[in-house]
Image: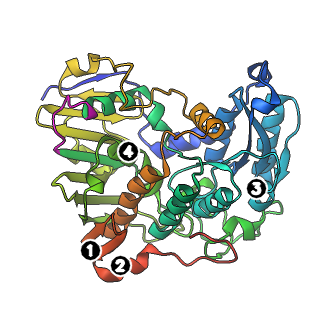
Amino acid sequence: MKKSAISRRRFLGNMTKAMLAAAIAPRFLSSRAFAAGVSANDRINVISIGTGGQGSGLLRNFLGLKDCQIIGICDPYGKNREKARAGVKAAYGSECAGYVNFEEALAVPSLDAVVIATPDHWHSAITLAAVKAGKAVYCEKPLALSLNQNRAVQNAVNSTGAVFQYGTMQRSMPQIQQAIELVRSGVIGDLKRVDVWASGSAIGGSTAEIPVPADLDYNLYTGPANMRPCTASRITNGGSWYCSDYALGFIAGWGAHPLDVAVWGMDSDLSGPYELRGSGRFPTEGLFDTAIEWDVEIAFADGLPMHFFSHGYASKYVDYRSTATGDGTTFFGPKGWVSVSRGVIFASNPDWLKIPIPKASERISHRPNYYQAFIDSARYRTSTLTTVNDAVRSDAISHLANMVARTGETIVWDPKAYEIRAPKPFNRLMDLPTRGPWATT
């Protein structure tokens, strides 16, 4: 097959390094100029909850919006909280409030919306509390640590009509939108197969106990997770990404991006029970214990196959495009294929990449700023770019693939009944015991 690409850029071979680089000390540009001419009554008041690596990047993006006002920072780690508050002051020229506990932040009368970028194990609890408080929610991916937590969030959002947007910002990227348009408009023909891959988790992490830092509320940091001894690695980005106490690892944390692209381009995961089989590899020492590699085949009820694997297998399976590091989603049809990653798109037919997206197309959003789209939805109570229903769809695939990778068992999932048909005992894995008073389901 002929291969072609447009808008290529050099990708970092290690996506973990890319994420860490994005998280380091973002520059907070002044937002006072953006706010000119926008009255206080027309701004959406936002509190940012969780301001470590990803949270600091999100804060920078929301600070640049003229009709968004960051009125508070919430983080149990003082160094993160105060660094973020300093960034807000640099942008606005005035102080904003700081909170240790999210419950205190949610009680602020003037609050309209929250941005949740905590470690993954807090996502469902804070989202449920925010929805109950009547706030609009932007929640980072993955949605939760268990299938039942996902379901609880979905039910809460849908039953209340709450504004909820999932943190899969790739939906506003032009290459992703172009790929979806090519697939859903039928350019490649009826969908026949999908490949999805993502970066695996890291290995290592210190297990040596250290004193809890004086400015960290470690009980609140741990929250509904199992209480463990504090180590230097546990309270870093790596700990929050690669410890199973707090996350599923990058099979979900990074896999959410290409899986979201996949569910956007197809409906096969909604057609009925589907089967997953495969294998995985996990660390045998160190603090980090989430999947390093996985190789999972999925057979949907309508006959569509999906192959979901870690990027280490890309050199073996992705021989149809020139580079496949990091993550990607490929859609195959009888007329050819289109493959997309962040910032780059490939196609078997170079001419397809020259087809403009119709301005009237309803298959994509036409909204280039993912963060502004959330603020608009919060103001006008309109549908968001990535709804809770799509979040649950893509999250289910990563949760089930993780079960397959850990056990080697074949799993049959019924999305309509929202249960594991086989093996039946695996339904117990859909729930997750939680510590303390925080409701996660």
Magenta span of residues: 184-192
Residue at disc 2, secondary structure:
helix
Mark 3, residue position: 106
Of callouts 3 and 1, which one flags the residue occurring earlier in the amino acid sequence?
A: 3
| Mark 2: few/some/many CA within 10 Å (<14, 14-19, 20+) | some
Secondary structure, mark 1, is loop
The image's mark for residue 426 is 2
Q: Is mark 3 on a helix, strand or loop?
A: helix
Measured Cα–Cα span from mark 3 to mark 1: 42 Å
Residue 258's disc is 4
Q: Distance between the residues labelled 3 and 4?
A: 32 Å
Residue neighbourhood size for the residue with mark 1, other residues' Cα within 10 Å, grouped as few (<14), some (14–19), many (≥20) = some
Which residue sits at x=50%, y=59%?
154
Q: What residue type is labelled 3?
A: Leu
Category of crowding for the residue at label 3, using alpha-carbon neighbours closer than 10 angstroms: few (below 14), some (14–19), many (at least 20): many
Q: In which quarter of the image is residue 421?
A: bottom left
Left or right for 217, reference 143: right
